């Protein structure tokens, strides 16, 4: 299947215009006329991901985080990013990234989080990077945290708020959503991947419970949606844990 045909399907599912203005999404590396049979989906491009894709004879890597964000001023092979570009091109491996457009689209990262948490009425007609949903019957913050740990498979989270507080309205943003705390003030709790110290302070000030469960952990589950979409195109999608190679928790 031609890469341009794959891109058409990916962009029909997650339109690039949904991306934030600062973001960089789309074809990062490669040629639209390359023929693709086998691909790999990962959160990031790392040396381990590239090596795995080469071993598996993949022609395409689809990532969530953009492979290229800032403009390159030279191709100096002493630079790690440039070395990765050279390696990928030497093996005819294309890279396509779908970032905040995948966060915002229907069935994207944040919809997936809502589904995992079994929230109600989280759908929105307006493109928005966040979702707000509800529980029909309230639960305590302690119970909400337990649910987050269970569905995301994490052993710990960071949080602020009274563990006995009743939770009914929930806001979610996968990844790094700490800067959006103020926009969630009308909810009981805000789940995101990571936040800064002063953003926790703001949440406490506006009486908003906040739970952070990890940048990777809140985004990675939704990658299965991309894998399914690619398989529906009759592409072979290889799987592996190589994208975890740089990320450890003790």
Image (tube, rainbow, N blue to C red):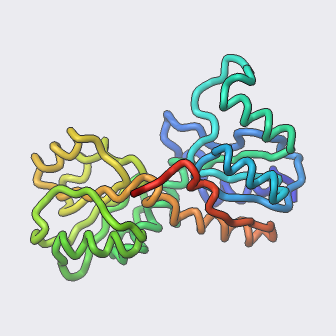
| Picture residue at 24% right of the left edge, 81% below the top | 136
Q: Position of residue 82 (x, y in %)?
A: 71, 29
Q: Quadrant of residue 190?
A: bottom left
Coordinates of residue 226 in the picture (x, y in percent): 63, 63
Q: Nearer the viewer, residue 142 or 51?
A: 51
In the image, 136: left or right of 236? left
Q: Position of residue 202 (x, y in %)?
A: 16, 43
Q: Residue at x 37, y 75 (%)?
A: 150
Residue 87 as seen in the image, left or right of residue 204: right
Query: Is 203 displayed left or right of 150 in the figure?
Result: left
Residue at image position (66%, 70%) is 228
242 w.r.t. 164: above or below: above
The number of discs equals 0
Q: Is residue 128 visible?
A: no
User: What percent of the width, then of the height, locates residue 97?
Assistant: 64, 47
Please, which residue is most extreme toward the front here? Answer: 250
Q: Is residue 96 visible?
A: yes
- Residue extending farthest bottom: 137
In the picture, which quadrant includes the N terminus?
A: bottom right
Q: Does residue 201 appear to the left or right of 18 in the view shown?
A: left
Quadrant in the rendering for residue 117: bottom left
Q: Which of the 4 image quarters holds residue 40?
A: bottom right
């Amino acid at each position: 299947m031609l890469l341009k045909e794959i891109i058409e399907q990916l962009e029909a599912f997650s339109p690039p215009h949904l991306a934030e203005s600062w973001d960089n999404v789309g074809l990062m590396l490669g040629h639209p006329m390359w023929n693709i049979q086998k691909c790999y989906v990962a959160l990031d491009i790392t040396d381990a991901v590239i090596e795995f894709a080469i071993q598996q004879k993949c022609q395409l890597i689809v990532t969530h985080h953009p492979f290229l964000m800032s403009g390159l001023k030279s191709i100096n092979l002493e630079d790690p990013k440039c070395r990765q570009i050279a390696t990928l091109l030497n093996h005819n491996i294309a890279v396509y990234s779908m970032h905040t457009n995948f966060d915002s689209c229907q069935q994207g990262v944040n919809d997936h989080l809502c589904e995992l948490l079994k929230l109600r009425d989280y759908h929105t007609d307006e493109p928005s990077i966040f979702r707000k949903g509800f529980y029909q019957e309230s639960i305590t913050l302690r119970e909400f945290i337990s649910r987050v740990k269970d569905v995301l498979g994490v052993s710990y989270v960071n949080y602020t708020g009274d563990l006995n507080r009743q939770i009914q309205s929930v806001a979610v943003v996968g990844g790094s959503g700490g800067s959006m705390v103020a926009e969630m003030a009308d909810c009981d709790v805000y789940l995101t991947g990571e936040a800064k110290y002063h953003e926790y302070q703001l949440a406490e000030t506006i009486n908003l419970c906040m739970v952070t469960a990890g940048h990777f952990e809140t985004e990675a589950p939704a990658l299965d949606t991309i894998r399914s979409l690619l398989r529906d195109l009759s592409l072979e999608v290889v799987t592996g844990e190589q994208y975890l190679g740089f990320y450890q928790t003790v």
